[in-house]
Image (tube, rainbow, N blue to C red):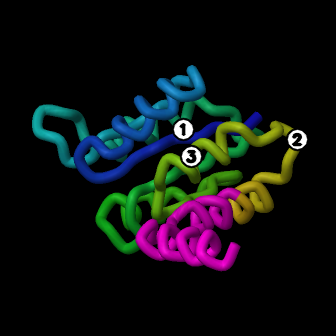
Amino acid sequence: MRHLLLTGHSKISEGIAAAVSFVLGIDLPYFNAYVDGEELFKDRMIREIEKIPESDDIIIATDIFGGSVNNEMMQLLNKPNVYLVSGMNMALVMALVMAEEEEDTEQLIRSAIGQAKEGIIFCNDALQTDAQDLDDF
């Protein structure tokens, strides 16, 4: 089995989890980081990970590479079957969630990252390209 855990600064992971729930009807565990009044996110994540069988794959998605949240999660890579992906956005998370369970986790992550990158578009350029295509027609 595969598990996806979201975390990031403030409430970004909560927002992405809420959006995925809205679109797909799937509730994902999320861990807000550095939010006043909340227990340390890393401690809560470790407790959650300890509930997961060691044979299961765990994908942790964080908001930004090199940020404090991602750096904290890097320390969990010594656990078996833990994968860490930074640069979390909704497209990435949806690709990870909608994948077939049988798909190899590393290949899935690479594919989902590629899909997420393709979805990042400067729309002004896309609009100009579409307008040019219409002019050529």
Circles 1, 3 touching at the beta carbon (< 8 Å): no
Q: Which residue is denoted by mark 3 in the rendering?
A: 93
How many marks the image carries: the answer is: 3
Q: Element under label 3?
A: helix
Circles 3, 2 touching at the beta carbon (< 8 Å): no
In the rendered image, residue 100, in percent from the top left (x then y), is placed at 82, 39
Say which quarter of the image contains residue 4.
top right
Q: Which residues are magenta?
A: 112-137
Using the image as rendered, state which of residue 118 and residue 28 is in the foreground: 118
Say which quarter of the image contains residue 73.
bottom left
In the rendered image, residue 48, in percent from the top left (x then y), is placed at 49, 33
Residue density around tag 2, few if under 14, some if 14–19, many if 20 or more, within 10 Å = few
Question: Does residue 52 lie above or below 114 as drawn?
Answer: above
Label 3 or label 2, whichever comes before in sequence order: 3
- Residue at 67% in and 66% down: 114
> Identity of the amino acid at label 3?
Val
Tell me the quarter of the image containing the C terminus. bottom right
Relative to 132, 35 lies left or right: left
Q: Which residue is denoted by mark 1 in the rendering?
A: 49
Tell me the quarter of the image containing the N terminus. top right
Q: Nearer the viewer's eye, disc 1 or disc 2? A: 2
Q: CA distance from mark 1 to mark 3?
A: 18 Å
**Numbered label attached to residue 102:** 2
- Residue at 88% in and 41% down: 102
Residue density around tag 1, few if under 14, some if 14–19, many if 20 or more, within 10 Å = some
Label 1 or label 3, whichever comes before in sequence order: 1
